[in-house]
Amino acid sequence: MTSVYVREQGAVVGRRGERLVVKKDGEVIEEFPMNQIDQVVVMGNVQLSTQIMTTLVQMNIDLVFLSSFGKYKFRPEGDGSKHVALRQRQLRAMNEGRLALPVAQAIVDAKIHNQRVVLQRQANRISQGRGQNRGATVWPRDRRLFDQSLAGMDKMRRAAQQATNLESLRGHEGSAARHYFAAIRSLLDRSWGFERREYHPPPDPFNALLSFSYSLLLKDVRAAIQIAGLDLYAGFFHVVERGRPSLALDLMEEWRPLIADALVLEMVNRGAVRPDEFVWTGRQQRPVELGEAGVQRVLAAYGSRLSTRLYHPLAGPGGQTTLQQAVILQARRMARLIAGKEAAYEPMRAK
């Protein structure tokens, strides 16, 4: 997917012929061929002309609005979903509860598996001196804690497989997450100030970096669900509440380690982003922010990460596709399950 990020505050996005044009103070600062764009992401105080919004919707180009700090705000849709029967089945399945536990267990099992793989890869990279930089330790600062965390995650994964209800499953997933982030803490230099996963608001640079990467991932998972024709608010694992995109949060879980966490750890290990680049604002609602140059590097790295190729059984001849397309294929897998064309949901698992 070719994504265009418009981040210049006060800019105006419009159309000139077959090109998307970004202007500020009457001067063109960027332009792109419309036929090469799959997604336009508007961040912060950016205006769009009626003409370009109409064109983007008509051309099925995904339009996403984020805050200037990357938090998801909304996305406009066309005439709504044409997949009425599929959504009826989805709502019926959610109400009946027949799919909730097995789908949630599959997602949690894959998430914990993928988290353990990410940790082991990062530890091996650091111990071998590959990609090592100021952001990472020579080896986990507390090797015992690191190994205990891996063992604790595996224990929680087995417990999740035996869960008999969603409440206990969520408890096992939460415990695994605490082990996971404790292990990540042992992989980071103390200058990152990371103690645990916190996000309302992120209190330190590493948490802020995670939250930003998760916002980017969420926008793409939401787009995949829309493409698959599903209702993103009717999920199975996350509690259904007003305004919460439960299905998007469900489908994000298997991808968090493989896309967002792996990306953040790789950038930290390579020194592509450093703690001293963050700004301490003194504001309670947003105490730490990533600087302009850092945001640009994260966006570029995220786009590069999504273009990484891997095997997916639904990708057609050869099975090779990009991570971006694999996210869409997983949403379609969920749609096939809900439509009764699959017996179980098969999440993505790192090899």
Image (cartoon, rainbow, N blue to C red):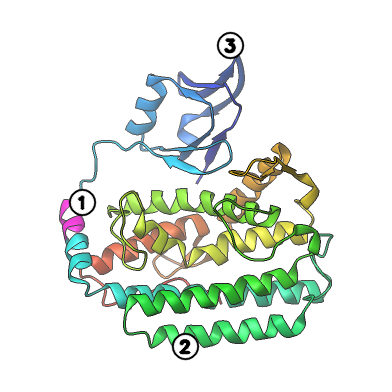
Q: Which residue is located at x 26 percent, y 77 percent?
A: 343
Instruction: Give the quarter of the image for residue 43.
Output: top right
Crowd band around label 3 with a 10 angstrom C-alpha radius: few (<14), some (14–19), many (20+): few
Mark 3 sits on what residue?
Answer: 26
Q: Magenta region: which residues?
A: 83-88
The majority secondary structure of the magenta stretch comes to helix
Marks 3 and 1 sit apart, C-alpha to C-alpha, by 42 Å
Q: Which structural element holds mark 3?
A: loop
Q: With 80 as the anchor, is 178 left or right in this view? A: right
Location of the C terminus (image quadrant): bottom right
Mark 1 sits on what residue?
Answer: 83
Q: Position of residue 250 (x, y in %)?
A: 39, 63
Mark 2 sits on what residue?
Answer: 158
Q: Which numbered disc, 2 or 1, marks the residue closer to the eye?
A: 2
Does label 3 or label 1 sit earlier along the sequence? 3
The kind of residue on which mark 2 rests is Arg
Q: With 195 as the anchor, is 212 left or right in this view? A: left
> Which of the two residues, 144 or 264, is positioned nearer the viewer here?
144
Q: Is residue 330 magenta?
A: no
Does label 2 or label 3 sit earlier along the sequence? 3
Q: Position of residue 311 (x, y in %)?
A: 50, 68
Marks 2 and 1 sit apart, C-alpha to C-alpha, by 37 Å
> Which of the two residues, 318 or 186, is positioned nearer the viewer here?
186
Q: With 65 as the anchor, is 136 left or right in this view? A: right
The kind of residue on which mark 1 rests is His
Q: Position of residue 184 (x, y in %)?
A: 68, 70
Marks 2 and 3 sit apart, C-alpha to C-alpha, by 60 Å
The kind of residue on which mark 3 rests is Gly
- Asked if one can make out residue 281 in the rendered structure from this viewpoint, the answer is yes
